[in-house]
Amino acid sequence: MNRLQQFFKEMNNRRVKTNLIFIVVAAVVLVLISGFQYYYSRHLLGIELEEDTERELAQKEAFLYSYRSMCENSLVNHIWDLEHYLAMPDSMYDVAEWILRLNPQLACAGIAFTPYFYPEKGRLFEPYALRKDDEIVFKQLGGKEHDYTQGQIYQWVMENDRDYWSEPYFDSLVKPRDLITYCFPIHGNKSQIIAILGLDIETSFLGDTLNSGNRYPSSYVLLLDEDSDLIVGPKEEILPKVCVENVAKVICDDKIPAKTTINNKCYFKQFRDPDDGYKGHVFYCQMTGSKKWTIAMVCYDDEVFGPLLHMRRIVSLLMLLAMVVLTFIILRFVRNDIRLEKAHAEQERISTELHVANEIQQSMLPHQQLYLEDADIYGLLVPAREVGGDLYDYFARDEKLFFCIGDVSGKGAPSAMLMAVTHSLFRAFSAHENNPARIMYALNEASCQNNEKNMFVTLFIGVLDLPTGRLRYCNAGHDKPFVFENDKPQVVSLECDANLPIGALENTLFTAQETVLTAGSTIFLYTDGLSEAMNSKHLQFGLKRVEETMKTCARKNLHPKEVVDEVRSQVRAFVAGEEQNDDLTMLVIHYTPTRFDSTVSETLVIKNDFHELTRFSSFIKTVAEQMKIEPSLAGQLRLAVEEAVVNVIDYAYPTTTEGEITISMQSDGKILRFIISDSGVPFDPTAKEKADTTLAAEDRQIGGLGILLYRELMDSINYERTNGKNILTLTKKL
């Protein structure tokens, strides 16, 4: 014992030294990480700056292109109006007004006619419309004080006979302001220029638009002409004139290498402003078209990287504090290190075992989806923990669909074990029994044995006869299923008797109920993990929401898997990520019976007398000839049906009682059915175990070989007791 204590003491001393070395190394590493983080973050911030600035420049460039195109299209679109009203000189004011009203961003619009084009208007006639406050006013600018024919814009357009964008200029004729003019020549019948249609744009509007929404408060956008002179920029208080000259000088300076941005769509240069000493970046790109304008954006380093430097100082202080706290924590928790390792190892073992248990539990369930000729089935179990206490199962036998869904009381491994036992017992008891109440009774008796913890299971068992849609079911304290038909708004809950859950009390009698599902019906079964799903406000999903969801599924005409997906979607939206305490299990069955249109039908009624077998043989021979069945197959059919009829003659009626046996044949050319009905004592051949032909003759039980024979010869058999009659259907695919 002392040696063991000494061993743990030595281990703890070694760990203290190791952790002190770790602290020193961690401090050095943290300093290196801090430096690397700062410079790498600065690099990433620079990349982000390039991407964002490039994106902003692209947006502003797109705005300029679209604005320039809008101005150009505005004039082109009004040429027809001008030509149409050319004979009415006073209507030219209306043309100018239309241009302004259709383009609220324009300041003025005017038409300068060639001298004496309208003799009655004198030598110079220039109808002009401009915005004043919220109104449009009109002026006739042509005259002695304003001879537009001497202007540079007018002369350029007349000489070159094409549209023209002017350089920015100061205009005081109407009111003091900086303008840019766009002009377009108007031709007469002889292709001579008769007028110049133009519009004016206030540079302040362009400057304010380009500088709206900039990333940094002190960053700004400039629009430069081909000579790097300022066209538009921000307001004077933001941009002193000397800054424009410095930016233009940086762009034109070949000694400063230009670099391309991330996507190679614009250029940028680093610079230091000689006047204020600030470092910064200028990003710029050149527009294409008749005017090679350059858009430039200026950002200063202190505004871009200043917050990062401030954050670095704070992070350094926090890292120093963290090192102190880390040292304290390490020294404090060394003593518990070994215990934590043991606890962790135990937790890993338990987690591994629970994971294996979950895989085993999931493997016991049937495949999530099953397609039959007469039904589509989909089931899902979502455990709230590693293993769950819910179960569902389904399988088809003798043209019947057997299914169940259940919820075991309690949580965790004990519930999972009881779930596995219940699942196995259901498969065993339903292998040779068609009555759900008897299956439930057998399950209850088995569950009550050695049930010292008084655990119980709420369970619903159903047996659906696929050809007829007859559903027999037994409910042991489980939630009532919902039934609905697609494209119909009505959703009903299945009426269920109040039976006790299985495992609660021995010798409990369970009642069986039945209903008939119509073609296209869907039955939705679930556990209380659905209705009791809870959100953060402790509100439950509730049966009302389940019913509304079923109505939605019916309206959308959803298939079983889509129904489950729709319900899960509604539950997720309701709980909004809140962790659930109960398993969620759903089972959906969509009944789609195969339509059987009989083209050939024959019926024979005989007495329960072996002498009647001669008539039966003639009946089978007639059927085979009528259906043109090959002799070997006809022999098999005769043998199988005759064996079934002989069983009825032997056992259906008491010895001294005379009864009738009806044998009907129906076929659609692909499937051949023999329906044998009698009103004798109930007898279900599908519930009888197959005879074991591997045993010696003296070891076998008497009987059962005939049933084995027509089971093997026919593709499927189906038994129903309806209206006091035994109805046995033998089916063969041709």
Image (spheres, grey):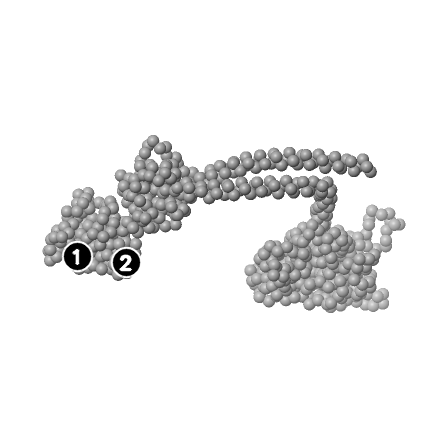
Q: Is residue 688 left or right of residue 328?
A: right
261 vs 415, nearest the viewer: 261
- Name the image quarter holding residue 557: bottom right
Neighbours of disc 2 within 10 Å: few (<14), some (14-19), many (20+): few
Q: Quadrant of the N terminus?
A: top right
Question: Helix, strand or loop at disc 2?
Answer: helix
Question: Circle 2 is placed at which residue position?
Answer: 101
Question: Circle 1 is placed at which residue position?
Answer: 140
Question: Helix, strand or loop at disc 1?
Answer: strand
In x, y percent, where is residue 233?
31, 46
Give amino acid for label 1. Gln
- Name the image quarter holding residue 240: top left
In x, y percent, where is residue 498?
73, 67
In x, y percent, where is residue 90?
17, 59
Q: Residue at x 67, y 58 (%)?
A: 529
Q: Residue at x 39, y 42 (%)?
A: 299
74, above or below 43, in the image: below
Cα separation between marks 2 and 1: 19 Å
